[in-house]
Amino acid sequence: DRVIIRFAGDSGDGMQLTGDRFTSETASFGNDLSTLPNFPAEIRAPAGTLPGVSSFQLHFADHDILTPGDAPNVLVAMNPAALKANIGDVPRGAEIIVNTDEFTKRAMQKVGYEASPLDDGSLDGFRVHPVALTTLTVEALKEFELSRKDAGRSKNMFALGLLSWMYHRPTEGTEAFLKSKFAKKPDIAAANIAAFHAGWNFGETTEDFAVSYEVKPAAQAFAPGTYRNISGNLALSYGLVAASQQADLPLYLGSYPITPASDILHELSKHKNFGVRTFQAEDEIAGIGAALGAAFGGSLAVTTTSGPGVALKSETIGLAVSLELPLLIVDIQRGGPSTGLPTKTEQADLLQAMYGRNGEAPVPIVAPKTPADCFDAALEAARIALTYRTPVFLLSDGYLANGSEPWRIPEIDELPDLRVQFAQGPNHTLADGTEVFWPYKRDERTLARPWAVPGTPGLEHRIGGIEKQDGTGNISYDPANHDFMVRTRQAKVDGIEVPDVEVDDPTGEAELLVLGWGSTYGPITAAVRR
């Protein structure tokens, strides 16, 4: 009823592409799924070494699942390093498919194997399938006049074909993908498709794989609707675009590239047709400075980063708290401190997001729980920022950003109305009857101040980081006023209306409540159910 597969190889072996294609076919088949891509932080770690191993894990099932799984049922190891780096996670009795062509004496010595693990009995507890993936791929592509090196690059497609046969995955989507990806190089597309078919046929004809498996679609796990496979960063990008459309505001992203947040910049840059402007700044501080300027100018403003970037942006986040302007700070968390673990997941930025600013600068925080939930979290963060005129943290992480799951595409009428009214004229009457504009006169329900777009006649007002006088927005050093403003900003955040916590208690008789936040939802819920 469920299978966990891990593809592992050198970071040049195309493991992420292989896993992504298997995932797409699994999604179209109708299984529930959860994925965990894992790759080195270095641009190109030395080939054949343990730090250079890249892997992609996929858990798919005929029922509702919540995690990419702990222990793979199938490990595809493209070289000795991939085997050594991952064998500790593989339970006894699991299937291991190894590319025997790569088990040369030099390659094994590079990772510390004295003798071949395929011959010394160390793998006796597993069902090992030795397959000469490179040789078989080169043989299958003889007609394509490719060098052995170029032909060997298609071995990941051979492996994908073999696994697709083992688990009855559809093939049409991968064939269409390869034709599209290599549209300008039809011979390369044809070679990859041939390698893919050769892997499928190898599974069909060899006696080493006597069994194939069928994991039925997860018909009961999904509410009716149109679904697609989606990663967290893509869902978050779509959520930001949807929020700008629902708010009827242009979307502005001021960003500096950083793993694992850069995908959002890449994706949003494709959507100029929705009024999206993206600015790749020279550094983290310029990125948020530009975004805050865009918020002052009347845009739905966003800046994206990871933990090290949040540290650099903290002064400008404090300025946004003081100016009381809507701004989304998207932190795709990773391991720290300092550069830390750029491609590995941690949820270690919570206290930095809550308290990492000088003075008393409260900021609300929204954290998605699954890759698909990143879409809803982006809409919720935008609602809070726009309604309450405050910067909002959106705390995702590398696990959600790169992982994927099925997502039901919502209908437009299901999305919230996020439209806001800009200040149009005077909002306060002085004792002498004069009508004036007070930039810090507040909405009685939300305590939000008016949003006055620059250039609106009569709405001139001071901005800046020095403490404001209540109401007028003039500079104030009065301690009583400062105390009042600090308490008012805190009260505004405390008063944000959010939905009640939903408790996952199918029986209604549970005696113990387990609380978590963010992406720990999947592991915690899976553990509680078990």
Image (cartoon, grey):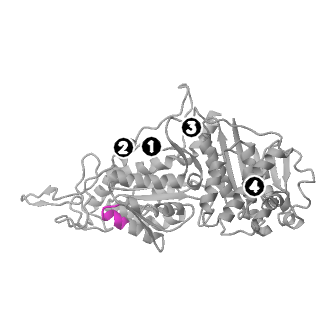
Q: Nearer the viewer, residue 175 or 431?
A: 175
* Displayed quadrant of residue 18: bottom right
* Marked residue nearer the N-terminal end (4 or 2): 4
Residue at 47% over, 56% down: 237
Q: CA distance from mark 1 to mark 2?
A: 23 Å
Would residue 180 appear left or right of 142 to someone viewing this image?
A: left
Label located before the other in sequence (3 or 4) = 4
Question: Separation of disc 1 and disc 4 at Cα?
Answer: 37 Å
Residue 497's label in the rendered image is 2
Q: Say whether residue 217 is left or right of residue 223.
A: right
Mark carried by residue 410: 1
Q: Earlier in the sequence, mark 1 or mark 3?
A: 1
Does residue 293 belong to the magenta stretch? yes
| Residues rendered magenta in the picture | 292-299
Judged left or right of residue 384, residue 206 is right
Q: Secondary structure at mark 4?
A: helix
Q: Position of residue 73 (x, y in %)?
A: 75, 43
In this figure, which residue is indicated by the disc labeled 3? 514
State which tag comes first along the sequence, 1 or 4.
Answer: 4
Give the residue type that dot 1 points to.
Pro
Q: Quadrant of the N terminus?
A: top right
User: Along the line of sight, which residue is nearer the eye, 507 or 225?
Assistant: 225
Which residue is tagged 4?
A: 158
Magenta segment: does it hold 427?
Answer: no
